[in-house]
């Protein structure tokens, strides 16, 4: 009995020592990461959708483009001084306005977009609204020493993309025609970018990014805690 009792005490102590070492290791690892939380708010452009439409469209004189630049927020947490994981939400709104008062122009639009014209008077002012939402999970690789006020990083992200164009005629939503517009929207969002930030204080700074997937150029405010 004394031998079994001694073995039980030995294994219990062994487990406690292992657990203690694990906790110490985790605390040491996280203690090495200063300011692990980061929040970025940004705006950027240009819109690749707008550029592609302008390049492919033959009706530049008849179309008017407007909208808002891409806006987003990114939140991430450093697991290591060189690596962080986070989530990003991005929103962009684009709009195309045009008038159809000429039957020949209407026939060209009809042939191009395969629009059904049996239920409405096709002439008037058209508005095409194109909101886009993107939600992604990002992995960030930080290349500079953590003690620096500067941060040079590479971001790779993947997530969901939601693009839902809506066509209006004289202010009326043409829901039964929206499926004929012909937009192709991939459900997958991605982001590959490189960015640089500089902190005026230990917590607050500015940053800029160049990348593919989302805005080509973006800039905004960054905060770390």
Image: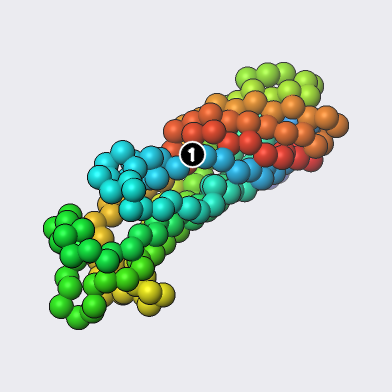
Using the image, determine if residue 59 lies above or below residue 144: below
**Colour mapping:** rainbow
Determine which residue is flagged by label 1: 46
Q: Quadrant of the N terminus?
A: top right
Badge 1 local density, few (<14 within 10 Å), some, or many (20+)? Answer: some
Q: Indicate the position of residue 119 as horizontal and vertical percent values.
A: 20, 81
Residue 14 visible somewhere in the drawing? no
Using the image, determine if residue 14 lies above or below residue 87: above
Depth order, front residue of 48/60: 60
Where residue 195 sits, quadrant-wise, is: top right
Q: Residue at x 58, y 36 (%)?
A: 218
Circle 1 — which element?
Answer: loop
Where residue 11 sits, quadrant-wise, is: top right
Q: Residue at x 67, y 35 (%)?
A: 78
Furthest residue toward front? 102
Residue 48 visible somewhere in the drawing? yes
Using the image, determine if residue 208 lies above or below residue 121: above
Q: Residue at x 15, y 78 (%)?
A: 118
Depth order, front residue of 89/164: 164
Q: Indicate the position of residue 132 as horizontal and vertical percent values.
A: 45, 55
Left or right of 132: which side holds 209?
right
Where residue 175 sits, quadrant-wise, is: bottom left
Q: Quadrant of the C terminus?
A: top right
């Amino acid at each position: 009995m004394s031998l079994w009792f001694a073995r039980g005490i030995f294994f219990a102590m062994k487990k406690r020592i292992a657990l203690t070492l694990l906790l110490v290791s985790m605390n040491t690892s996280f203690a090495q990461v200063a300011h692990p939380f980061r929040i970025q708010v940004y705006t950027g452009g240009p819109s690749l959708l707008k550029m592609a439409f302008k390049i492919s469209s033959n009706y530049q004189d008849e179309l008017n483009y407007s909208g808002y630049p891409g806006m987003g927020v990114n939140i991430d947490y450093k697991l290591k001084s060189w690596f962080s994981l986070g989530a990003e939400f991005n929103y962009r709104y684009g709009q195309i306005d045009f008038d159809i008062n000429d039957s020949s122009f209407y026939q060209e639009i009809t042939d191009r977009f395969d629009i059904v014209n049996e239920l409405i008077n096709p002439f008037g002012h058209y508005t095409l609204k194109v909101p886009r939402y993107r939600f992604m999970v990002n992995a960030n690789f930080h290349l500079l020493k953590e003690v620096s006020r500067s941060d040079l990083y590479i971001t790779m992200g993947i997530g969901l993309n939601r693009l839902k164009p809506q066509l209006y005629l004289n202010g009326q939503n043409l829901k039964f025609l929206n499926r004929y517009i012909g937009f192709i929207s991939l459900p997958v969002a991605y982001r590959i970018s490189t960015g640089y930030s500089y902190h005026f204080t230990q917590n607050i700074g500015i940053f800029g990014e160049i990348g593919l997937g989302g805005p080509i150029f973006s800039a905004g405010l960054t905060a770390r805690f």
